[in-house]
Image: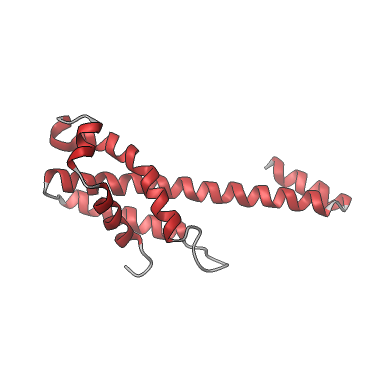
Amino acid sequence: MEELLDLKSLLLQGDVVGALAIVEELEEMSRDDKINNIRSYAVVLLLHLIKQQAEKRTTRSWEISIRNSALEIKNKNKRRRAGGVYLPAEELRLTLEEAFPLAINSASLDVEEGRYTPEELEQLVDQNDIIRQAMVLISPDS
């Protein structure tokens, strides 16, 4: 909110350069918020894909969570007015890769009732395959 007041003040003073700097900062803050939101849903999506692969089974609850997380990621990534997306495919992939360790940590508590440490669980699953599955689920065409 403080940034908006500063922006208003700079515009009233005619300081276009200063106002543009604040606009760029606001854009960056908004983009960071989108990325953080997408990463949060990515952790949930990856968590359940990890559990499926590690346990070689699925449940209705996991399936629903996977679908809901994929839908939320698609929704959050969509630019409403400008069209397009906030994160192109390569940046989405990087976001999934950043979220993977968090998902492994959480999944280690669930897979076979917490039998594996995060490091052991990471050795049991194929990160590239899980990321590929996630990318298919969150692609605009799916």
Q: Residue at x 39, y 55 (%)?
A: 73
Say how the picture is coloured. secondary structure
> Relative to 79, is 101 on the left or the right?
left
- State the count of labels: 0
Quadrant into which the N terminus falls:
top right
Res 81 quadrant in image: bottom right
Q: Residue at x 52, y 63 (%)?
A: 79
Q: Percent from the top left, x then y, of residue 76?
A: 45, 56
Res 137 quadrant in image: bottom left
| Image height of 16 relative to 113, above or below | below
Q: Residue furthest right?
A: 13
Pick whichever, 33 or 130, lies toward us. Answer: 130
Q: Percent from the top left, x then y, of residue 20?
A: 75, 53
| Image height of 4 relative to 107, above or below | below
Q: Percent from the top left, x then y, of residue 74?
A: 40, 60
Pick whichever, 73 or 116, lies toward us. Answer: 116
> Relative to 129, is 43 on the left or the right?
right
Q: Residue at x 17, y 37 (%)?
A: 111
Q: Residue at x 11, y 49 (%)?
A: 57
Quadrant into which the C terminus falls:
bottom left
Q: Percent from the top left, x then y, of residue 69?
A: 33, 53
